[in-house]
């Protein structure tokens, strides 16, 4: 076998591996019928899959609420959460614009957008992010939010990756529609979106409760919650509800997060 043939075969193996990983990503985002499907993990999964599979180094998801404002549903790593929050506070940035127009938005050089988004265009390069790709979260003619991907390299994201980001975002939005917050309720997009936002708000309260009780950072509190839910075979939603309803004590989560049921 020639060197060119070996290189070609190696490239095909890499491409097949990526195709398999993409297939698994779509399954993970779309499997709303799985007993363990958890709407609190949906957008975290979307961001993590995009970072793992596409030319992206960070990401975040903003979703519109019933009053026309936007809420942070996911962000990774931590500095991306700050950039998403900055867009909410200033009402400007690629996520906000993408949601408003309902169309993808690519920015090859954030530093050149200081007149357009002065706060974000100053903060993102300072954190090492130089370009973005933003795609709408949409269901048919409805846009419910936006997925924002940040890159450390300047220049447009590869077109194939931009298309895959949109496909993954569409899959997550469709999963939100098919997920039933209340089996007896109707399936309108707004109701499902508001239910997911309410759960996310409850998660933030639960994280604060654990962080306060254990005297740990919020990130560590999140990890304790996830480990406790996994050890009990329960959904994160169920654990969060129990904490907020005061039927589960933060001390139990902290003490038993690493102790599986026998």
Image: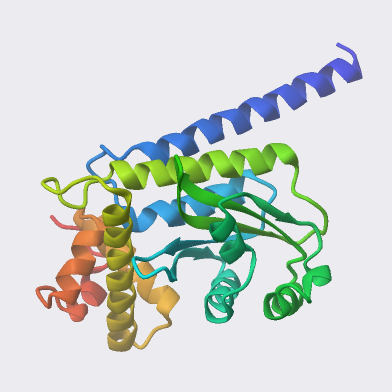
| Along the viewing direction, whichever of 114 and 180 lies nearer the viewer | 114
How far across and how far down the image is residue 137, in percent? Answer: 49, 50
Which residue extends farthest right? 3
Residue that appears at 58% across and 63% down: 95
Residue that appears at 13% across and 75% down: 245
How far across and how far down the image is residue 138, in percent? Answer: 47, 47
Instruction: Locate the N terminus by quadrant.
Output: top right
Relative to residue 177, is residue 72 drawn left or right?
right
Instruction: Locate the C terminus by quadrant.
Output: bottom left
- Residue 234 placement: quadrant: bottom left
Residue that appears at 74% across and 48% down: 157
- Residue 115 placement: quadrant: bottom right
How far across and how far down the image is residue 132, in percent? Answer: 70, 59
**Considering only vertical position in the picture, is 167 above or below 119?**
above
| Along the viewing direction, whichever of 231 and 116 lies nearer the viewer | 116
| Along the viewing direction, whichever of 196 and 216 lies nearer the viewer | 196
Relative to residue 238, is residue 32 drawn left or right?
right
Relative to residue 6, is residue 228 drawn left or right?
left
Residue that appears at 55% across and 55% down: 147
């Amino acid at each position: 076998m020639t060197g060119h043939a070996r290189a070609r075969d190696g490239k095909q193996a890499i491409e097949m591996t990526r195709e398999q990983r993409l297939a698994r990503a779509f399954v993970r985002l779309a499997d709303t019928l799985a007993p363990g499907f958890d709407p609190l993990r949906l957008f975290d999964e979307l961001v993590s899959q995009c970072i793992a599979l596409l030319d992206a180094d960070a990401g975040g998801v903003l979703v519109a609420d019933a009053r026309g404002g936007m809420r942070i549903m996911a962000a990774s790593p931590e500095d991306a959460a700050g950039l998403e929050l900055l867009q909410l506070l200033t009402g400007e940035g690629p996520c906000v614009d993408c949601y408003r127009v309902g169309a993808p938005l690519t920015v090859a050089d954030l530093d050149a957008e200081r007149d357009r988004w002065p706060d974000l265009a100053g903060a993102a390069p300072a954190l090492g992010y130089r370009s973005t790709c933003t795609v709408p979260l949409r269901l048919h003619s409805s846009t419910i939010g936006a997925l924002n991907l940040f890159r450390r390299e300047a220049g447009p994201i590869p077109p194939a990756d931009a298309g895959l980001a949109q496909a993954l975002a569409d899959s997550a939005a469709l999963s939100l529609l098919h997920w039933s917050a209340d089996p007896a309720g109707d399936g309108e997009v707004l109701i499902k979106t508001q239910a997911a936002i309410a759960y996310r708000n409850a998660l933030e309260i639960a994280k604060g409760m654990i962080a306060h009780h254990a005297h740990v950072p919020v990130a560590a509190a999140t990890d304790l919650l996830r480990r406790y839910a996994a050890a009990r075979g329960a959904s994160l939603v169920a654990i969060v509800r129990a904490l907020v309803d005061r039927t589960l004590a933060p001390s139990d989560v902290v003490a038993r997060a690493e102790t599986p049921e026998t």
